[in-house]
Image (cartoon, helix red, strand yellow):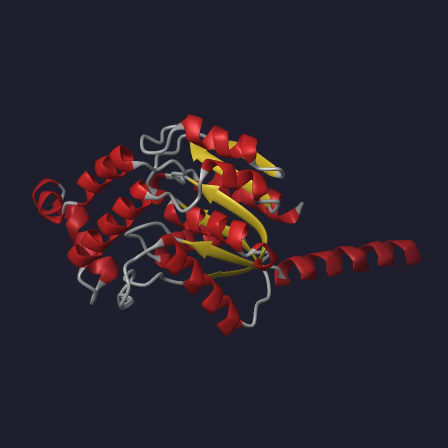
Amino acid sequence: MASIFGSLFLFGRSLYLRRMQPILLLHGAIGAADQLQPLAGKLPNYKVMSFNFSGHGGKEFPVEALSIKGFAEEVLAFMDEQGLEQVSIFGYSMGGYVGMYLAKHHPQRVKKVATLATKFYWDVPTAAKEMQMLDADKIEVKIPAFAKALQERHAPTDWKILLQRTAGMLRAMGEDNPLKPGDYSGIGTDSLVMLGDKDKMVTLDETLAVYKSLPNGRMAMLPDTQHPIEQSNTEALAFLLNQFFTD
């Protein structure tokens, strides 16, 4: 009988510790923290947190240009405000890039990092192609529902200015990628890179290249998943994250 109670105690203690484990969800470019709430609801055994990057979700723009380095500093500031020495990170798209950047430059602050739909490869032609998708006037004409969603998501911030400043960030990344191909071999943090099987923005080759470079990396493909976070297979994503963060 004692052994049974002992096992139950250890199980309960393990579950309690997992509930205390902080996980930070980072949204993508021109996105917001609320887009990750459906996923947060499927991670019940952890202390799940999220916040909006500057210029996103109604938050004011920074004085300086938008940048991966700046967003990484915002994550560190948020952690300090919450009294967190270390967190595990899940980042969608740009949020995943920020997570990897932190794992490279501030490894002591990142316990584990998982990414989905993160574009790791940037050069001038790649940036130019992605910048074309940030034309506010074309979005208003061709995809008015998306324009309305952006306006509502970022109010009172001007979503058109957000697109302009994001385009500037992509241009800078194309000229000088913040994470070079050789950087990933120096990231010792436990990492999981994920890609949707129907993602048309991020290539399998660039995702594989990063996975193969990471000393402690894993990779997974999500079925029936396109690039937009709203079109991801949330059940499969939550399953993989629960498994990864628990191991």
Residue lying at 26% horizontally and 65% vertically, measured from the top left: 61
From where the camera sits, is residue 158 visible? yes
Residue lying at 19% horizontally and 47% vertically, measured from the top left: 146
From where the camera sits, is residue 41 visible? no
On screen, residue 62 above or below 143: below
Q: What is the x, y in percent for residue 100? A: 49, 47
Q: Quadrant of the N terminus?
A: bottom right
Q: Quadrant of the C terminus?
A: top right
- Residue 212: quadrant of the picture: top right
Residue lying at 59% horizontally and 61% vertically, measured from the top left: 86
12 left or right, relative to 198: right
Q: How many marks?
A: 0
On screen, residue 71 above or below 186: below
Q: What is the x, y in percent for residue 28? A: 35, 49
- Residue 196: quadrant of the picture: top left
Camera-side residue of 181 and 100: 181
164 left or right, relative to 75: left
Q: What is the x, y in percent for residue 84? A: 57, 67
Camera-side residue of 169 and 144: 169
Camera-side residue of 50 and 69: 69
Q: What is the x, y in percent for residue 162? A: 22, 56
Q: Furthest-right residue in view?
A: 2
Residue lying at 75% horizontally and 61% vertically, measured from the top left: 13
34 left or right, relative to 134: right
